[in-house]
Every structure is written in structure tokens, then in C-alpha cells.
Image (cartoon, rainbow, N blue to C red):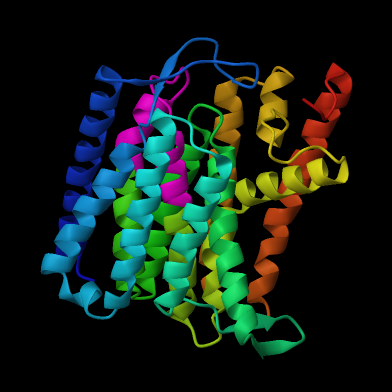
């Protein structure tokens, strides 16, 4: 990519960021209010649905992409159906922000969208494991793809509970993914990640603590689904599909917290469908850690993980899966720190 082309793309991204910001300002002026309850981190009504700015910026970018950018459109035309599925998820989530929908309906919508992705041919077909080698997945690849897409969609959604945390993390992750995809000449992933990053750049200033608006399900579910799809698309960067690991690595802190919390609650026989405030980031805030500090720490996790993703590109095939170990070590240290704060504060792990 030439410098002139890069500057043109960044200028277009700036325009999308301004579109996102204008949409967010509109959502603040004509709000869908999020009233606090016993599970909330806020103590006053705050507008939600600000993620609509991210959605509209992404849609606008995609419309231009498919009208003018043949370099990405021709090679990845089959992903049009997936983009439409992501928009459908955003529409259902926006309705959920306006009037709460049953959890089962939301899950059905996510599964349906994941099936559209798999039906378009967006499926993991092989997996390379250290010391084992490349394994053809067959039908298990379809199941793994569906599990990943639905799981990532919900993990991002679950983690959106503290001012600036998810918005900043996703801005860093999407910017890093765009840079990596550009280096790998994966132009569809490059463009989609750039559009998402632009959307979050327009949204984030309004979501910093104390937040003027929340992302809402319309933003978190849309972003989680789209990034999950881009992870499978990124697997095509190499013949062994090891590049699938890039997006999970960029999102590792979010996935770790969501996965650990779900596993812990299941172990403690809690009702998984009930609301709670026991994610690690929530417990850290409840023990007195400032909201800005918790959010900034997660941005630091995202930057560290972005560095590992860049390192991933330069490792030998056998070592690539092992790049997740430093990210895991950091999250285990964070878990130990939060556990210590919980113990000293007397909070406990339930609630």
C-alpha cells in the first residue's frame, strides 16, 4: 500500500469517526435512558445505545467499499451475507436497548447470524496444534465456528459494564487488526477493522468516565459478532489457518474475564441467566479501584496483546500458538490481584 493510499484511507476513517460522533450526540439529545438498579455501576439515569454510531459508521464504510473498492470487494464478496447478519444482530440489540427482550430471543438471533456466517463458507476447516500438527476438523469445524462466534458476541457484551473499558479496548484491537491485515494484504479484514476502529474513535470520547452515554447492546453485540467473523476471515491469511488466533489474542483480556466468570459461576452453582456484578473488572471497581484506572489497565492489556499479535506474525508455525502464554500469564496475575482485593475487602464472589 502506498503512503498516498494510506492517507486516503485514514482520511475516510476520520469521516466515519465524525459520523459516529454525530450519531452518538443525537442519541444523547434524544436518549434511551438506562435507569440504575442493584446490578448497575452507575447511580443516575444515563443514555444508552451509543454503539449505534459504531454500527452506522461501519455500514457507511461498507457501502463505499462495495461500490468503489474492488481490491476488497471481489475477493471477499461472500462476506456480504455476514455483514447483513451483523446488521440484523444490531437491529435486534437496538430493540433490546429500547425495550428488554427475552434472553432466549437474543440468543436465537445470535445463533441464526452465526449460521449465516457458516453457511457462507466462513468456517474453520483445520487447526494447527503445537507438537501435533495440522488437524482437519471436518464437521467439528462448523461446530467450533458457531461456538466461537456466539461466544465472542456474548463475551464482548458481558464485558461492557464500566465506562470506557470495552470502547477503548476495541478501538485498540480494531486498529491493531487493521494494521496487521494490511501487512498481510487481507484487504477485506483491513477495511472492516478500520471502519470499526473509526466508529469506536467517534464513540469513545462520550463514554469516558463519567460516561455521557453507554454503548448498549446495539454496539457490544454488533462489535463482538463482527470481530468474531473477522477472526475466521483472518484465518485465511495462512494455509494452516493459524492466523485465526490473531483476533482472540487481541481480545484476550475480555475473553479471559468473561470465560473465567462463567466457569466460576457454574462451579459455584449460580444461575447463569441471572444478572450479577462479579466479573473481575466489576469486582476491582467494587473494591475501590477507580473506574478510570480499571479501564486504563484494560487498555494496557489491549496494547500488550497487540504487541503479541505483531510478534505472532514473525514466529515459526510451531511457536505461533504459544504466543498466547504471555497474555495468559498477565491475566492470571490480574486475577490474583483482584482476588486479593476481594479477600481484603470482604466482598466475596457472589452478588
What residue is drawn where x is 31% and y is 46%?
Answer: 55
Whether residue 317 is visible, yes or no, is no
Q: Main secondary structure of the magenta part?
A: helix
- In front here: 15 or 269? 269
Residue 4: image location, x then y, percent? 14, 63
Which quadrant holds residue 257? top right
Whether residue 189 is visible, yes or no, is yes
What residue is drawn where x is 36% and y is 25%?
Answer: 206
As for residue 164 lying within the magenta part, the answer is no
What residue is drawn where x is 54% and y is 71%?
Answer: 244
- In front here: 138 or 132? 138
**In the picture provided, is 49 more to the left or to the right than 269?**
left
- In front here: 313 or 45? 45
- In front here: 312 or 71? 71
Residue 103: image location, x then y, percent? 57, 42
Count all numbered tags in the image, as a single digit.
0
Q: Is residue 286 above or below residue 139?
A: above
The quadrant the N terminus occupies is bottom left
Q: Is residue 340 above or below residue 140?
A: above
The quadrant the C terminus occupies is top right
Amino acid at each position: 500500500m502506498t503512503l498516498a493510499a494510506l492517507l486516503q484511507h485514514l482520511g475516510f476513517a476520520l469521516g466515519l469517526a465524525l459520523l459516529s460522533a454525530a450519531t452518538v450526540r443525537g442519541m444523547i439529545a434524544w436518549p434511551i435512558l438506562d435507569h440504575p438498579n442493584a446490578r448497575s455501576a452507575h447511580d443516575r439515569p444515563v443514555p444508552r445505545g451509543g454503539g449505534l454510531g459504531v454500527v452506522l459508521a461501519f455500514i457507511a464504510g461498507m457501502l463505499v467499499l462495495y461500490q468503489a473498492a474492488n481490491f476488497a470487494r471481489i475477493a471477499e464478496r461472500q462476506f456480504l451475507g455476514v455483514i447483513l447478519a451483523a446488521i440484523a444482530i444490531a437491529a435486534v440489540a437496538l430493540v433490546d436497548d429500547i425495550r428488554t427482550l427475552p434472553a432466549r430471543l437474543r440468543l436465537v438471533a445470535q445463533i441464526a447470524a452465526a449460521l449465516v456466517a457458516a453457511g457462507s463458507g466462513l468456517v474453520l476447516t483445520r487447526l494447527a496444534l503445537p507438537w501435533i500438527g495440522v488437524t482437519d476438523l471436518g464437521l467439528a469445524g462448523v461446530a467450533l465456528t458457531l461456538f466461537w462466534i456466539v461466544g465472542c458476541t456474548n463475551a464482548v457484551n458481558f464485558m461492557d459494564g464500566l465506562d470506557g473499558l470495552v470502547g477503548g479496548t476495541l478501538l485498540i484491537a480494531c486498529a491493531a487488526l487493521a494494521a496487521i491485515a494490511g501487512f498481510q494484504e487481507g484487504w477485506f479484514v483491513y477495511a472492516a477493522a478500520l471502519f470499526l476502529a473509526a466508529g469506536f474513535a467517534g464513540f469513545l470520547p462520550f463514554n469516558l468516565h463519567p460516561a455521557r452515554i453507554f454503548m448498549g447492546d446495539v454496539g457490544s453485540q454488533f462489535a463482538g459478532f463482527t470481530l468474531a467473523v473477522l477472526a475466521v476471515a483472518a484465518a485465511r491469511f495462512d494455509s494452516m489457518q493459524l492466523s485465526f488466533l490473531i483476533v482472540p489474542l487481541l481480545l484476550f483480556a475480555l475473553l479471559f474475564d468473561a470465560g473465567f466468570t462463567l466457569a466460576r459461576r457454574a462451579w459455584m452453582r449460580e444461575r447463569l441467566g441471572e444478572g450479577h456484578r462479579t466479573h473481575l473488572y466489576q469486582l476491582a471497581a467494587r473494591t475501590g479501584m477507580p473506574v478510570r484506572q480499571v479501564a486504563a489497565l484494560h487498555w494496557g492489556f489491549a496494547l500488550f496483546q497487540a504487541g503479541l499479535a505483531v510478534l505472532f506474525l514473525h514466529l515459526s508455525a510451531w511457536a505461533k500458538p504459544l504466543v498466547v502464554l504471555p497474555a495468559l500469564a498477565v491475566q492470571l496475575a490480574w486475577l490474583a490481584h483482584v482476588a486479593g482485593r476481594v479477600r481484603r475487602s470482604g466482598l466475596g464472589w457472589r452478588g
